[in-house]
């Protein structure tokens, strides 16, 4: 077997699986998550994040610029593809499953802490990071219903009826995100 294909051969000189940039991003993202859910009350600042991640603060400032930008990136990364768009065969079933899955996700204390920090620190950019992927998922559900020949509500109406109450209840109240409550949201949107 040639040396270059031997399992024990070192990687090709210059090859950086994932690269330094990917390692720095992963370390910084992990540091942010640890600081948000940590009980030591360390402030979420670029120098504190950098120290926790083991990188220079200049590296973090250069890549993200501000805590708000950093939180938006962490949140966008966290929410990308974590909820599968359901296909139950009906709009009601899809929305009920989607709302239930989102409620479970928002019920996770670490996820909720990240959402609260992102909305609180990131302003409009943080809010956009929290809703962007979610609206795309809703849009996919509504587009599928239209392709099936149905007449789904608009994305705006669906967002107002399903997504907004889920986020409001999770972020601003201590009320539970129950399966029954998520079904009620969908039934208000799609009355029989």
Image (cartoon, helix red, strand yellow):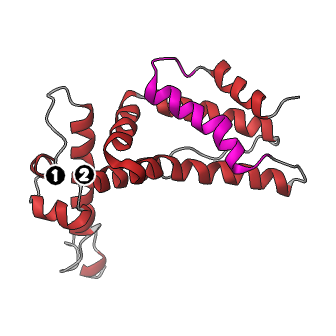
Which residue corresponds to the image point at 90% horizontal and 53% vertical from the top-left?
Answer: 149
Q: Is residue 173 magenta?
A: yes
Closer to us: 159 or 14: 159
Closer to us: 16 or 164: 164
Kindly check if marks 2 and 1 are in contact, taking CB atoms under 8 A apart as contact.
yes
Closer to us: 106 or 1: 106
Where in the figure is residue 184, as x and y percent of width and height?
71, 23
Query: How many marks do you count on the picture?
Result: 2
- Relative vertical location of residue 164 with respect to residue 21 in this rendering, above or below: above
User: Considering the numbered disc 2 on the image, is that residue within a helix, a strand or a loop?
Assistant: helix
Q: Is residue 175 left or right of residue 10?
A: right
Where in the figure is residue 72, as x and y percent of width and height?
36, 52
Q: Is residue 99 magenta?
A: no
User: Considering the numbered disc 1 on the image, is that residue within a helix, a strand or a loop?
Assistant: helix
Does any portion of residue 98 appear in the rendered image?
no
Q: Quadrant of the N terminus?
A: bottom left
- Relative vertical location of residue 131 with respect to residue 98 in this rendering, above or below: below
Q: Which mark is residue 28?
A: none
Between marks 2 and 1, how big is the CA–CA gap? Answer: 6 Å
Q: Is residue 92 left or right of residue 97?
A: right
Are there few (<14), some (14-19), or many (20+) residues within 10 Å of tag 1? many
Q: Which mark is residue 46?
A: 1
Q: Which mark is residue 67?
A: 2
Q: Main secondary structure of the magenta part?
A: helix
Are there few (<14), some (14-19), or many (20+) residues within 10 Å of tag 2? some
- Sequence-wise first label, 2 or 1: 1
Residue interval drawn in magenta? 153-177
Which residue corresponds to the image point at 18% horizontal and 62% vertical from the top-left?
Answer: 61
């Amino acid at each position: 077997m040639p040396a270059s294909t031997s399992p024990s051969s070192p990687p090709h000189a210059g090859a950086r699986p994932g690269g330094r940039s990917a390692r720095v991003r992963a370390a910084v993202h992990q540091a942010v998550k640890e600081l948000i859910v940590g009980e030591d009350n360390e402030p979420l600042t670029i120098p504190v994040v950098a120290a926790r991640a083991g990188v220079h603060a200049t590296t973090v400032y250069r890549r993200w610029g501000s805590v708000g930008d950093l939180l938006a990136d962490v949140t966008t990364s966290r929410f990308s593809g974590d909820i599968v768009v359901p296909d139950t065969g009906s709009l009601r079933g899809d929305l009920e499953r989607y709302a239930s899955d989102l409620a479970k996700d928002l019920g996770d204390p670490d996820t909720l802490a990240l959402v609260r920090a992102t909305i609180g620190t990131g302003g409009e950019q943080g809010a956009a990071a929290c809703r962007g992927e979610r609206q795309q998922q809703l849009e996919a559900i509504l587009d599928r219903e239209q392709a099936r020949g149905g007449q789904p509500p608009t994305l705006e109406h669906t967002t107002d009826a399903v997504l907004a109450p889920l986020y409001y209840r999770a972020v601003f109240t201590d009320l539970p995100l129950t399966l029954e409550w998520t079904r009620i949201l969908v039934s208000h949107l799609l009355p029989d």
